[in-house]
Image (spheres, rainbow, N blue to C red):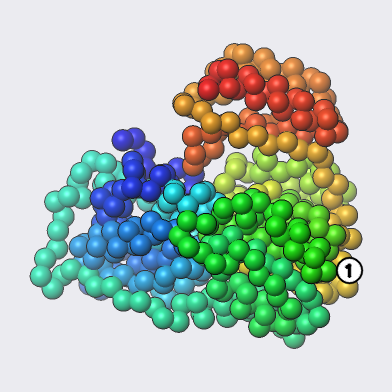
Amino acid sequence: MGKLFGTDGVRGMANEGNMTAEMVLQIGRATAYVCKEYHKEKGTRPRIVIGKDTRLSGYMMENALTAGICSMGVDVLLLGPLPTPAVAFITQSMRADAGIVISASHNPYYDNGIKIFSRTGYKLPDFEEGEIEELVLSGRINNIRPTANEVGKARRIDDAMGRYIEFCKNTFPDGMTLDGMKVVLDCSNGATYKCAPLIFSELGADVTTIHAKPNGMNINDECGSQFTADLVREVKAAGADVGLAFDGDGDRLIAVDENGRELSGDQIIAICTKTYKERGLLANNRVVGTVMSNVGFHAAMKQLDIEVDVAAVGDRYVLEMMIENGAVLGGEASGHVIFHNYHTTGDGIVSALQLLSIVMESGKPLSELALVMKVFPQKLINVDVKEKPPVEDIAELQKAIKAAEAELGDQGRVLIRYSGTQPMCRVMVEGPTEEITNAIAQRLVDVVKSCLG
């Protein structure tokens, strides 16, 4: 069956491949086994936290995971629907041994996935994922079976949401409120649908919420951080100060200013980085982006005399580089933003609160704050592919890339990479004008289709 773990856990079509109930049960068993190793000398019983988003298949996956974990003599703490970063926080807060999130993030409802956090609240390191993978794929886990009073038990944590709400509010400046601010929230019919409106309302904002009625099949459906058209319309109609869009599992944020203009993760990071530097909070005068960060982001940071470290795509790689280089801010254009002084992972709600605190403190509208960065026109096209041979080995595509780069010169760039979680190739072009950017991107897409379609 091949590898289980991609760049962000295990992911795929629910009830097929690596995401069947049988496979999820085995993943639960293997994760529990790895956790038990930590407790051997202590003689105590391990505990694993499980949270999920709002997908229909989440019920099936939750029960399969619970059964697998309990069958290995490990207890389960069930949180129900909560954002991914909430699971990371509660895992650490409750001194649990691991936290598992059942979610396919921004993917459609028919996909699902599993992300695992360690007891420290950080995503499980590669070597531990590798150990879990080997236990499952080799079949070694099949013959390890505690019995009688050694099996585990499960219980629900009824106050999990309240714990997370207080955590988020505590990242907002003491004494500051959102009184007088009109905010529109797009919860993507996902994991933030209950907690996000409560958090912003309790801080004093006048909140309008859209896409907060999940039915198991409408998560990320033309809404949330990837589809902001409805949010833009509502911000304009309500005369709101800001619109905030989360993805299905709540670890991404895309903002909309008072004029209905969308701000990417790069722009949010640029605003926060500038403010952090002014406040003396920007550790080591550096921020972490990725190879997908807009050319305009790099230009803005250079203007501010701030060092930019470039990580591979994926919030886990951003965080690794942040820790390695001592940065407190980093993230991706897609809306993953990590405030390492507050959390161990990207958190859409925490990111939104930091952004709004800057709006409140500065007294400036979001549109004015966004002027810190000029966004170069960017075109990103996802192309479905049947296989993923190394891009550098495809001669025809390399020839097309070199021609595009020669045409752009220092006025843009080209990036072609495979998705780590889906069977697709991402073609991204940045250039001096929309017309040039779109034309080059389409030419490259045609080549990708001819080579890999």
In the displayed structure, 183 sits above or below 386; it is below
The reply, left or right, for residue 136 in relation to residue 452 is left
The reply, left or right, for residue 71 in relation to residue 329 is left
Query: Total of numbered circles in the picture?
Result: 1
Q: Nearer the viewer, residue 30 or 61?
A: 61
Q: Nearer the viewer, residue 339 or 71?
A: 71
For mark 1, give the secondary structure. loop
In the displayed structure, 314 sits above or below 392; it is below
Residue type, numbered disc 1? Lys
Residue drawn at point x = 81 percent, y = 58 percent: 260
Spot occupied by residue 451 in the image (x, y as percentages of width and height): 55, 18
The reply, left or right, for residue 323 in relation to residue 263 is left
Q: Is residue 143 visible?
A: yes
In the displayed structure, 197 sits above or below 61; it is below
Spot occupied by residue 320 in the image (x, y as percentages of width and height): 56, 51
Spot occupied by residue 186 in the image (x, y as percentages of width and height): 65, 63
Spot occupied by residue 377 in the image (x, y as percentages of width and height): 80, 38
Where on the picture, by quarter, is residue 240? bottom right
Instruction: Name the residue furthest bottom.
Output: 175
Q: Residues within 10 Å of mark 1 (few under 14, many from 20)?
A: few
Q: Quadrant of the N terminus?
A: top left
Instruction: Identify residue for label 1.
Output: 364
Residue drawn at point x = 42 percent, y = 70 percent: 80
Residue drawn at point x = 34 percent, y = 43 percent: 16
Residue drawn at point x = 50 percent, y = 77 percent: 161
Q: Is residue 277 visible?
A: no
